[in-house]
Image (cartoon, rainbow, N blue to C red):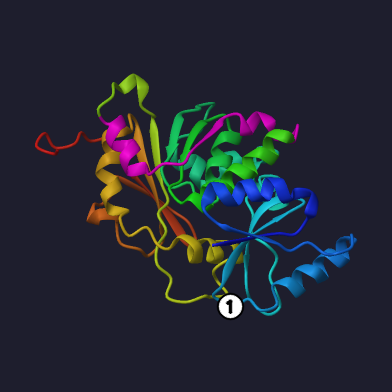
Amino acid sequence: MKLYCLHEAQAGAAQAQAQAIGASFHAAWPAQPRDARGQQQHRRHVFSALNTDDAVLIYDDQGLALQTGDTPLPGPVRVDFADAALQRRTSHGHAAGESVARACGLRKGATPRVLDATAGLGRDSWILASLGATVDMFERSAIVHALLADGLRRAHAAPALQATAERLTLHGIDAHSALAAMAQQSAESRPEVVYLDPMFPHREKSAKVKKDMWAFRHMVGSDLDADALLDLARAVATKRVVVKRPRIAPDLNGEPPHQRLLGQSSRFDLYTPKPLPSNRP
């Protein structure tokens, strides 16, 4: 993976980030300072050779982002908890009506501890935290973890976002290992809700797949081992496991849930807690 630094003033931070995730560092800032329009022109010039299926990391004045190739060149994809669309979903009581909030049991002031085992771009975790839930986010991809950490850094620096950001804790380890360890702990130390939103395969880039989610899936691939998480998640959660799925997708691990919440294009499958088999290693 390549990381291109587009602002000389950010070179130190960009080099440290590249080293942390094992990316190669490339200085790509303009020879002369430019205004916002000039910066956009420079970015298009730098990445004009990117193919549609290419992806690189960039570090600019806002922080870390993922840049994919296309014509015209799309904007960079970053974890932005200040995003206007996300803020509309979490302002003026709107978050309480979100399907993920209802599925995870955030109603009538309930603020459970949630373990998001497949954090992705962090939006669902942010919605839950905006309602008062304490959320542990697990992300095994070093690159996606870096994008999440950068987004949380900016959220902590924004006064309007600090309270929500403080309820989120990011872990850069595989959820399978974390859940296996938690399954041996007492109920008091385990989360009430485990949330799973595994990536499912898409055969090709489609207009129905949002730019950021396509780029994200292109980067990390599908969660082909997602079925194995369900039993562990049910052994860890003290109240429920919530699995987000495409509306027409088969049940995770072939196990029907005890309840479904249906949306237009996706659904939330709810499972009750269940101990691991006694003969499981």
Above or below, 58 against 17 in this view is: below
Q: Quadrant of the N terminus?
A: bottom right
Q: Residue drawn 76% across and 74% down?
A: 45
On screen, residue 6 above or below 197: below
Find out whether residue 38 is within the magenta segment.
no
Residue situated in front as seen by the camera: 175 or 25: 25
Q: Is residue 152 visible?
A: yes
Circle 1 sits in a helix, a strand or a loop, which is it?
A: loop
* 160 falls in the magenta region: yes
On the picture, is 145 further left or further right than 84?
left
Rendered residue at 55%/46% (across/down): 20
Answer few, some or many: residues within 10 Å of disc 1's Cα (few below 14, many 20 plus, some between 14 and 19): few
| Corner quadrant of residue 253 | bottom left
| Residue under pointer 1 | 52
Left or right: 189 as drawn, with respect to 215 = left
Vertical placement of residue 219 versus 170, above or below: below
Amino acid identity at mark 1: Thr
Q: Residue at x 28, y 21 (%)?
A: 186
Region rendered in magenta: 158-183
